Image (cartoon, rainbow, N blue to C red):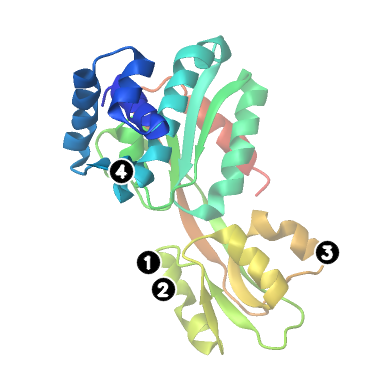
Amino acid sequence: MQLKALETFLCVAETGGFHAAARKLNVTQTAVSARIRLIEEETGKPLFTRGAGGTGLTDFGRQFRPYAEQMLSLWSFAARDLPMQTQNRVALRLGAQLSIWDPLLVDLAIQFENRLGQLLLTLNFDHDLNMVDAVATHVLDAALTHEHPKDPRVQSNELSAERLILVETPTADDPVFVNLELGELYQDHVRTTARQARGQTVFLGNCLMALRYLLQRGGTGYFPEFVIRDHLSNGDLIPVVGAIDLMLPLYLVTRKGTATSSDVLTCLTDLREPY
């Protein structure tokens, strides 16, 4: 989609008419109509209503407007500001399949900067995204996943498994089991614990939200040791006696031949040594 078409769409929306937009942009009305038609053809939706009362945005046009503004703003940043900010800086885009590793991504980014200098950094927290495919298609440079990647476009390194501990709050009037639903291995491991709980709350993998809920609500749940270490030390959480720890596999995924893959692996290995 052409940037001029987006600029024209926003101008029509602002001025309230095709004639006014053509005057402001110093182009013909035919050019304005053609640019608007280009967006409508690509989206399959009309952007404006035209009638005796003037030109107004359709429902879709109102929904599309903030996206057009964001796209132009992003392009402006990329074309004007980004070149100045990226001089002598390594670009690194990181992602994780499960939210239990969100804190680890932040620590990894800091470790990487301490080792190699300031980054042009992107952290991806969209846990619905297929991280292996995102690495293979250059959306991400590196990702953490609990499933062994089989995509021939990527390479993977198996790291030490993540240790999840079943913990509970010391007291709770009506305790629940917090279920993170971290894949089949996790579900198989927690099935008995979940059945025995009087209540269950599902967080669909959002580890930090689940931890905050558990601390305030009271109950039990499996959490990574490095995430709850401070809460165990100060007594906010205690290990459930007799519970079996869950060892969740962890793989670092990078593209084959990527220059930064060895540096990411070194930083990540150094980070996880204390764990």
**Residue receiving disc 3:** 234
Of the residues under marks 1 and 3, which one precedes in the sequence?
1
Which disc is residue 148 wearing? none
Of the residues under marks 4 and 2, which one precedes in the sequence?
4
Looking at the picture, which amino acid does disc 1 mark? Glu
Which disc is residue 184 wearing? 1
Q: Which residue is nearer to you in this view: 124 or 146?
A: 124
Q: Are marks 2 and 1 in contact (CB under 8 Å)?
A: yes
Q: Are marks 1 and 4 in contact (CB under 8 Å)?
A: no
Distance Cα–Cα, label 2 vs label 1: 6 Å
**Residue receiving disc 4:** 53
Which disc is residue 188 wearing? 2
Q: Specify the farthest residue to the right.
A: 234
Name the element at disc 2.
helix
Near mark 4 (Cα within 10 A), the count class, few <14, some 14-19 or many ≥20, is few
Looking at the picture, which amino acid does disc 4 mark? Gly
Of the residues under marks 3 and 2, which one precedes in the sequence?
2
Distance Cα–Cα, label 1 vs label 4: 58 Å
